[in-house]
Image (tube, helix red, strand yellow):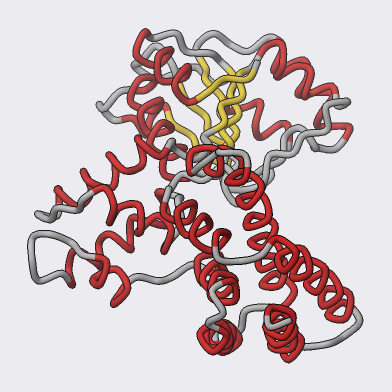
Amino acid sequence: MNQSQKEFKSDLKSGNIASLYIFCGEEGYLREHYLSELQKTVVGDMMPEFNLTVINHAPEFNELSDVVESYPAMHDRRLVIVRDFDVIGANAEFSEKAEKLFSDMPEYCVLVFVYGNIDYKPDKRRKLYKVFDKKGVVVNFSKASRTDLISWIKRRFLSNGKDIDTDTADFLMFYCGEIMQQLIPEIEKISAFSKKKEVTRADIEEVATRNVSSAVFDAANAVAEKKYAKALSVLEDLEAQNEKPIPVLALIAQQFKRLYAAKLILARGGGKNEIMELFDMRSDYPARLAITAAKGMDIRHIKRAIELAAQADARLKLGAGWEELSLLVASISAEGKR
């Protein structure tokens, strides 16, 4: 059974705890937070180490079954956590034995497989997938909504004695990304740096680590706004940071596709919210930038930019280097002057 974070939170609150879980999803902060809450619920705060086992490697079946079937000490239940082991993709011998164990878990044990450094991409044909679908619970901790993330950002800054308004929080999400686990150290740095109670965009730009997609977004928008020197400067910075040209080009192409979509949305009377929904944006800052850039660029020019990016991608895959991206900016510039 698949379950959302909110559904799991509700079950946790009511004490409706399953015996078998998979925790997955890109939002590591939430995943670890609710794992901690599950631990408190299952084994309590009094000497939890007696009834908590954490396995940080790919276990042999006998090792796993031994801890799962061990009775709790001075408590009703025990918790077993297995980290970064692809249980669904386990070998045939493990799967055959685990199928029986997972289908009839001891009522006193809660077993959780945590997908943190590995992705959860199960083969739905596997027997263990079908066991989890029937007997277990898969909880996917995905990115928080824009409203929830902004509220969380404000609370984190407030705990450091700082205030941040909604627009600046939006910019932080654009500049550093939308994953809580990545935002925590950035919030700490910004809070320590900011001399005033109110955090500003300038504070963020001064000390925060900018993510690659934000930089590429600015480079593509600079091209759209005919600020070609700025676009080249951003690309030079990315090269100096040892970013790979193919992923950067993919992000550039993606941004021009967004501009093309924004142009079509605007033409039929749509706006920011539709763009955010289409591209799964939590921050409305990039949506506003896309609208401004799309308004200033002819749709034929955008289509040509997408075509040129595809040609550059082919050359990069044949061995071209960073110079190909500079050539792309120059080519798009030349097309814009026709």
Where does residue 44 sit, x and y in percent of width and height?
A: 30, 23
Where does residue 137 sit, x and y in percent of width and height?
A: 60, 19
- Residue 168 lies left or right of residue 8; in this view the side is left
Front-most of residues 82 and 320: 320
Q: Is residue 214 above or below residue 18?
A: below
Residue plotted at (74% across, 88% down): 327
Residue plotted at (69% across, 17% down): 102
- Residue 133 lies left or right of residue 17; in this view the side is right
Q: Point out the residue furthest to the right here.
A: 318
Where does residue 292 sit, x and y in percent of width and height?
A: 48, 60
Residue plotted at (63% across, 20% down): 2
Q: Point out the residue furthest to the front here.
A: 338
Q: Quadrant of the C terminus?
A: bottom right
Q: Quadrant of residue 325?
A: bottom right
Q: How many marks?
A: 0
Residue plotted at (73% across, 91% down): 323
Q: Quadrant of residue 42?
A: top left
Q: Is residue 186 above or below residue 85?
A: below
Q: Quadrant of residue 320?
A: bottom right
Q: Is residue 194 above or below residue 239?
A: above
Where does residue 217 sit, x and y in percent of width and height?
A: 55, 66
Q: Quadrant of the N terminus?
A: top right
Front-most of residues 241 and 45: 241
